[in-house]
Image: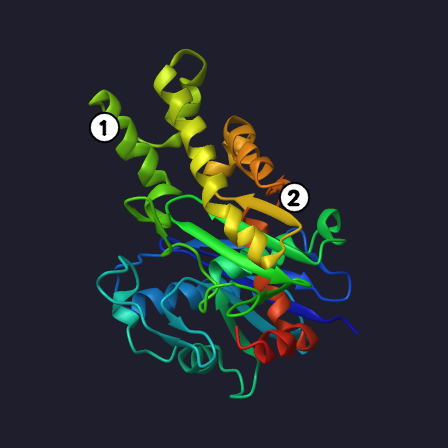
Amino acid sequence: MKKLALGVDIGGSHITCQLFDLNTNRLLEGTQKRVCVDGNGTKESILGSWIYAIKEALADINLYNLIGIGFAMPGPFNYNDGIALFDQNVGKFHNLHGINVKSELLKRLDFPENFPLRFLNDAASFAVGEANQEAVADYKRILVLTLGTGFGSTFLENSVPVAAKYGVPDDGFLYHIPFKNGIADEYFSTRWFLNEYKRLTGNEISGVKELLHNFEKDSVSQKLFHEFGKNLGSFLVPWIQKFGAECLILGGNISKSLALFLPDMENQFLTQNIQIKVFASKLNEDAALIGSARLCNDNFYSKLVSGMY
């Protein structure tokens, strides 16, 4: 019997869905659906777009084979109960604040109340998906970072996100940890590159991609990547040591330039005698789809719940 799950990646401007075969542990090719979403739209607009994408992804399968739907969902969100906690400060989905998304989706999909709809933080879903790769199968403790518009982090033990143990923060995240004159999110995101480039040159850039394009002939771009790597390495040292991380995986748009800041980051590790394998994400968006679909594996989900992540 086929055991299919639907992995769903919720973004501020899109929703992506793809079927996942829990028997083979693989995404099913040709089943991905991506739909634009107005993150500032009405409740009906947002939920309507989500429902449309989900129904499109499920249109060609026998629903008898579908055992659940997993969602990689940004926060703030009550993941256990499926309740949206977005507000005006988040910049998206504020019209869903207080809505029981799980109940709304079950009703609109005409699924029974006990049908498994499960939710996990989007960064954690990404991490779970990355840990699903054979290349990292031998590592017990893994730290996964997403470096992009924000700084995401997830600590994994045996592929399961952990928090509030082994020195990991109570919420499992590092974005709010103090660093230098602010918090980590201000230093390890696209925003830092934009702000620093303007501070040093007086000019504005559109994103990190522009720095990459000018890297060979722009000393400021070179300086920024060196500093970024040094800062990231020094910030991560105590967390790697406390957690005992054996492997570090970097995802997000900034990770595409890993070669430019990896030496400076690793030099910080070496000063503290830290030996850790570093990988750049190869799955990209597929990682969140795989991670969310794996929520429908009851054995994995029970470990997740028991760890109270």
Inter-mark Cα distance, 1 to 2: 34 Å
The residue to which callout 2 is attached is: 276
For image coordinates 48% across by 60% down, the residue present is: 122
In the displayed structure image, the side of residue 170 where residue 32 appears, left or right: right
Do we see residue 276 in this rendering? yes
Marks 1, 2: nearer the viewer: 2
Q: Residue furthest top?
A: 217
| Image location (x, y in percent) of residue 31 | 62, 56
Which label's residue is closer to the chain start, 1 or 2?
1
**Mark 2 residue element:** loop
- The image quarter containing residue 205 is top left
| Image location (x, y in percent) of residue 151 | 41, 49
For image coordinates 34% across by 65% down, the residue present is: 46
Residue neighbourhood size for the residue with mark 1, other residues' Cα within 10 Å, grouped as few (<14), some (14–19), many (≥20): few
- The image quarter containing residue 155 is bottom right
For image coordinates 51% across by 51% down, the residue present is: 238
Residue situated in front as seen by the camera: 170 or 29: 170
Mark seen at residue 304: none
Do we see residue 59 in this rendering? no
Mark seen at residue 199: 1
For image coordinates 70% across by 58% down, the residue present is: 140
